[in-house]
Image (tube, helix red, strand yellow):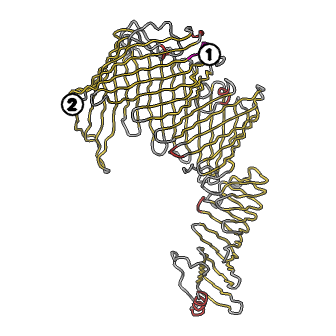
Amino acid sequence: MVRRVFLSFLLATACSAPALAADQPPPPQGEVRLQADRLAHDQKDDVIRADGNVELLWSGMRLYADMAAYLRGEGVVKALGGVKILRDGDVLTGDSATLQVGPRTGTVENGHLFVKKNNLHLRGGAIEKTGEQDYRVRQGSITTCDAEKPAWKFVLDDLKVTMDDFATGRNAYFYLGETPVFWLPYIVFPVLTERQSGFFFPRFGNSSKKGVFLDIPYYWAISPSSDATFDLDLQSKRGVGVGAEYRYLSANGGHGMNRAYLIYDTQQDRFRGDLGVKQQLNFSADTYWRADANLTLDRDYYRDYGEASGEYNRQFLGTTAFLSHRSESLLVTGGVDFIDDLDAANNRATLQKLPFLSLTGTGAPVGSTPLYVSFDSSIVQMEREVGGSGQRFSLTPRLTYALQAGDVLAGRLWGGYGQRLYHATAATGADGWHGQGAAEGGIALRTELARTYPISAGEMGAFRHHVVPEVTYEFREKRDESGLPFFDFDDRPTTGQVVTLSLYNLVTGKITGNDGVRYRDLLRLTVSQGYQLSGERRDLLVLADDGHPFADTRLKAELFPLPPLRLLTDLRISPYTGSLTNASLGVDGGGPKGNSLGLSWHHAQGRLDYLEGRFSYVDLQPFSFSAMGRYSFDKPGFLETLYSIDYKHQCWSFNVTYRDRPDNKELTFGFTLAGLGPIGPLRAF
């Protein structure tokens, strides 16, 4: 019936017909609609001929041409002159076309296919549509560049493309502009923006340690929630290395990453490499597993192969894994801690906790009283080949009384007893069973003051100053612990009485703008001072002087002068000499476009003294720049510098990175073709 109505329309039409509206809905499946300036029907051959502004609609496709003939019996459309075919944003143009209406296949001569989804351009002497998502291009090219003369392209004798899958071709020449750069007998690459398995473009460069190197990565999209990368690492001075990294997402917000690298170092005539495992599994909201395991085949591996900033001179390599379960007032954690001291000749004297188990009572009320009971307890197996091993059990119950005097004064009063029990080997200096306990306690009192000040500074109409002064008294009973084993400083807690005064300040601004009223913190500042009434002090960062009762004055602050800018300080100043004993000073900031700046100074008297800075600038498009450096004042000299320049074109990007370390100079080049890279974001279940 549709065919007869359509035919009647064609026979009754005048020499000209109005053009179809661009937003006209597609005809029903199997129906063809044709309009043009002039239409004629050859009844003998059942051919409908169209001339001038031809427009043809069928099965979700729209064709424009100067002339066309529809062979109804064969279901074939032949178009000539300015041929353009549109479907779902994709555009196929050419000089002429022969199309099968039913299967929607055919050939376009001197064609150009634009695929909107991944900005893909195919050009060729003939583009043949062989299936629903399949094309074949003879004597053609492929690129993701929009320009008539693209910045890059692959030119091939025979190219086969399956949308949302792969493009394959033979006898391929890669062009930069109009210049051929290299030849490949066969290529395979993905042609979609979703994650897809395939090769990355190689990284290459030169290093004083590695020599000339070439890294060829392959990406495997295993599933919507997992993927992997494999690397072939060719180094002229070191040999051939292989690497692998597996990443996954799991239910309940879990995720993980496993990686490994192995190389036979021809310079040292041995295998070298490392292994890393990171896991976060949530069995429920209250039960979870965490693991961060790191192992290496030799102690100097990172000095030669460390890639990340600060990795080449790392001192320790740690492995931690634990399982935790928490309830309303209880936390249970069991796991292992393993440390590899890379600066030591071997790891025989390094203390390991294999395993440990802790049980913590976070606080439960005692009936309807203002009293709370809490406790800390742990069992640790201490292991090492040299220096002795053993077990340590500790239990510290506490009773806390909450203090409240109206809205003026608040605080807490607590007391407890810390008991430790050991079983150790003779190498620790304390063979057999030993135990010791000591009383501890304290009181803390605080009050809060606040005042709002009206001001007129741009959009800021007021600021609020919130002050919290607090005084704390703590004591721990001194007992003779000379006969106890010593594994770590938890075996020798400090004793005596300490009074600490602190003053916390918070300044918050009230800002009124077009988007309404909002509040922003401007300053957080804490000043604290401790006084040793009796006993001894310990500071693991700097030398503590028991002869001076005043502890270092500590000043910790965060200043936010502008929304993207933060200044921070953490200073310890000797009240006797006025000198800095420990300091961390820094400034960092950044904008939404990606510009960032960071500078920090780290100082510990007699231990370390270095400056670290980083910088990135992206506003000079198409270029972006970044730099990083660490300078040591106590060495002195640069520990590491890194400079990187990126050039981003519409369809490709190029990166140059130069890294300078005391024993290694490295220049790396990276090249990316936009739209053909296989990586996309992981999708959760």
| Magenta stretch: helix, strand or loop mostly | loop
For marks 2 and 1, the one nearer the N-term is: 1
Amino acid type of the residue that numbered disc 2 sits on in the rendered structure: Asp
Q: Compared with residue 196, is residue 236 higher up or lower down, i.e. above or below?
A: above
Q: Compared with residue 41, is residue 521 higher up or lower down, i.e. above or below?
A: above
Q: Give the number of the disc on residue 596.
A: none
Secondary structure under badge 1?
loop
Q: Is residue 506 left or right of residue 564?
A: left
Q: Label 2 vs label 1: CA separation?
A: 55 Å
Mark 2 neighbour density, 10 Å: few (under 14) some (14–19) many (20 or more)? few
Which one is nearer the viewer's eye here, 98 or 479?
479
Secondary structure under badge 2?
loop
Residue 486: % across, % down? 53, 12
Label 2: which residue?
A: 407
Q: How many marks?
A: 2
Residue 432: % across, % down? 56, 10
Name the residue: 38% across, 15% down. Answer: 552
Which one is nearer the viewer's eye here, 144 or 447?
447
> Magenta residues, as a range?
386-390
Q: Compared with residue 237, is residue 578 higher up or lower down, i.e. above or below?
A: above
Q: Give the number of the disc on residue 349.
A: 1
Name the residue: 32% across, 30% down. Answer: 365
Instruction: Tell me the quarter of the picture where residue 592 sits.
Output: top left
Amino acid type of the residue that numbered disc 1 sits on in the rendered structure: Ala
